[in-house]
Image (cartoon, rainbow, N blue to C red):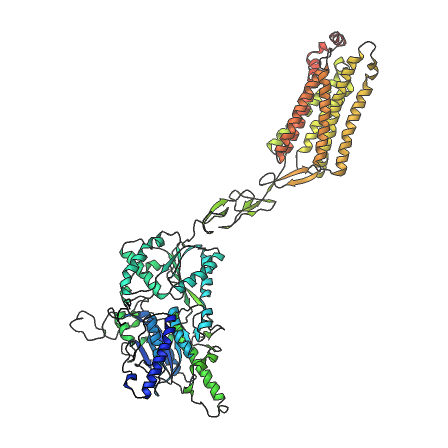
Amino acid sequence: MGICIWKEGFVTWMLVIPLLQLAILCCTVFKMTRSSLCIVHKDPLPILHEFYQPGDLIIGGIVSQVFLLHETFSFKEQPRRILIGEPVSVPKYYQNVLALVYAVKEINENSSILPNITLGFHILNNYYISRMTYKATLSLFTTQHRFLPNFRSHTQKMLVAVIGGLVSEISDNIATILTLYKVPQLTYGSFSPAEYHENAFPSLYQMVPNEVYQYKGIVQLLHHFRWTWIGLLAADDDRGEIFLQTIIPMLSQNGICFAFIQKLPKRTYMEKLIDLFVEQLETYPLLTESKANVYFVLGERSSVSVLRWVLFLAHIMSKPTLGKVWIVTSQWEFESLTIQRSWDIDDFHGAISFTVHSSQLPEFQNFLQIINPFWAKDDGFIQNFWEQAFICSLRMPNGHDENHKTCTGEEKLESLPGTLFEMSMTGHSYNIYNAIYAVAHALHAIYVYRLKHRRLMDGRNLEFQNIQPWQLHHFLKRIIFNNSAGDSVHFDEKGELVASFDVTNWFVYGQVLPLSVCNDHCHPGFSRKKKEGEKFCCYDCTQCPDGMISDQEDMDACIQCSEDHHSNKDKKQCIPKMSTYLSYKEPLGITLATMAISCCVLIALVLVIFMQHHSTPIVKANNRSLSYVLLVSLFLCFLCSFLFIGQPVKVTCLLRQIAFGIVFSVALSSVLAKTINVVLAFMANKPGSSMRKWVGSRLAHSILFSCSVIQAGLCTVWVSTYPPFPDSDMHSVDGKIVLECNEGSNAMFYCVLGYLGILAIASFTVAFFARKLPDSFNEAKFITFSMLVFCSVWLSFVPTYLSTKGKYMVAVEIFSILSSSAGLLGCIFSPKCYIIVLRPDLNNRKQFLRRKK
């Protein structure tokens, strides 16, 4: 009896297994009663593509070299095999078959491993269909050409291991059956996560390193090329979901974003292909218009096949080429069907693939040289492969195919393009080669173990052919050897091969490396600023503020320069700040120094004039000695300005404010004494006035001394507690280090300045009220003007001083000193000098007394 299984998937098969076991049990019972119902005459669903070679021990192989285009099951009629045309061969995967055959041949010819034991193989095609995968796997447990699982004739040899399959779904389908029998399975293609295998498929060994290593490598590759904006393409199935769940967090943690996620459908039934291609072509603009120039693809074979068809149809429909960089996983191979052999693959220019590491075996290439359509009579794959690879026919021509070229058998595999067949060993073939040797070494370890313990076994089970498949697990997990290429082969604790991936660039890049970013890179001098509502890979670029730089592209934040450095114009580099101070070499310093010298010369001239005319009434008027004190103090005030020009040092910093405070207090004290003296002189002229005793130089000198001593006391306290010192200001002026004198105590500075203000206001007030006193030469009037100028200068000084920075603060103070001193000089002494020099006729006692009356 025959049972057809049409439902695909692991769950369905688990439901079918009890039915199969029940059928087998019934058949066994009927066989015992010699009932004709249990006789299986013919396999109702034969596998047309297989390769069998007998041996003492058999290694099974499930390959994916041929597929069938089939219809959807309607469940309205008995399921049947419907072939749409001829079976379609994938020529490139025929090497997988040859790799298995070659490895078995090499082992059988090697006397150092498994002596006196011949390995055989049974390779079956699964047609990329789950139900046929189950069928092929069960066929390994039955007599050839008869589908009766669990029945083995006395001539059938023992199955010890199975090699397969190409993609994860096939591997899982095979493992579902083999796990029940505890037969070791060595998969050479993609696989489900190891955690799933450990729990569900303990008999599975993976000849491919864990895919997580691929993902880590790809992330490093993206970092190397600075590709942060990529497209993700994955199969529209559970494996694709697992891929996305794994890779997206890894990308995010490494600063990489995905522009889109495109699901690639699996190969489907014939009548749905047109709808599928139309549906995929509708999403083609997403691929072309995306700013992402790098696409990361989970390269499951069926999905990649659909992608190639879509790209081919897009060219036919004159759609724009993609021009993208493809990064693909190890499952991707640029294999082509016969119909695709002439297709242009420019869309994959620059593709980077992570391939399973493979070393080339020169003897394998020699083995490929002998392959022809008649090299092995039991090779059920060769006819379809040869005919479709070389586009010829091995059958005799008839009326229907007169125009079809007949194969000569002399065609050479090396003449085929690489997308159809490769002479160098591919990664999948290398995995199969290593898998066969792993099984052989495990069997040899059992062989050595049995010889070593022959006596202990007491003659039982000495035949090596009686080995059970489950016995290999202990040795497979611990096996380690070097293959003929010198590569080490062994498994880790999870049953995964310890190996590496190769990075292959399918074409060489042009002169310009492609960019794949959400927006242009932020150049040095700019930092990234996140765009609201968009992924973190999309950002604006903002220039660094003064004092900060960015010296690399795409910096998240600018770097603060040290205090003694500042940012250059482009904000790309920190450069040392230039020291600055009010120098004699710059125009401002020269101007102020010239003004000070001019004032000193002028006041010296006035002093000379006064000394030459010291006996004249106008010089004697209002206390001649106070006039000399005032002139000397003003001269010293002009000289004080030189302490503020030049590089600040300890001495000049200590003297400049102290000298300024004391000298100015002497000048203002003498002005105040003069003003009080005018008032007292007027009051003393009244008959019977008691103020006569206060008129004279004694009171004036007392006022001068006492007012000056107070300022001197304030300065002494200042110097004793918080003296001024040389300092540098790093921050006030951009790009400059201002060398300055730190006042030590701002409070003391403003106390000194405030005391001068008190003297000035007192002088101004007294002079203001005495300005209209009758006198031939009322000096109070001129003192009033001088104090008005003085107070105006210093009242404007404070806000101006506080609002300026650096050397300009010093310049403001110098200008205030010069202008206020010049105001006193001009307002008080210019009228006297005018009379002395230009109107000497007025400078006599008679004229002075007359005018006084």
Q: Quadrant of residue 85?
A: bottom left
- Residue 496 in view (yes/no): no
User: Does residue 219 appear left or right of residue 651 in this picture?
Assistant: left
Q: Quadrant of residue 487?
A: bottom left
Q: Which quarter of the figure is the C terminus placed in?
A: top right
Residue lying at the far left of the rendered structure? 399
Q: Residue at x 77, y 34 (%)?
A: 716
What number of labels is visible? 0
User: Does residue 679 appear left or right of residue 478 in this picture?
Assistant: right
User: Does residue 380 appear left or right of residue 580 in this picture?
Assistant: left
- Residue 559 in view (yes/no): yes
Determine whether 33 is above or below 537 in the image.
below
Q: Which of 689 and 75 lies nearest the eye of the viewer?
A: 75
User: Does residue 132 appear left or right of residue 526 in this picture?
Assistant: left
Q: Which of 202 and 648 lies nearest the eye of the viewer?
A: 202
Q: Position of residue 485 (x, y in %)?
A: 43, 75
Determine whether 508 is above or below 437 in the image.
above
Q: Position of residue 528 (x, y in %)?
A: 49, 48
Q: Quadrant of residue 269?
A: bottom left
Q: Which of 851 and 525 lies nearest the eye of the viewer?
A: 525
Q: Position of residue 69 (x, y in %)?
A: 28, 68
Q: Which quarter of the figure is the N terminus placed in?
A: bottom left
Q: Residue at x 71, y 9 (%)?
A: 841
Q: Position of residue 783 (x, y in %)?
A: 71, 18
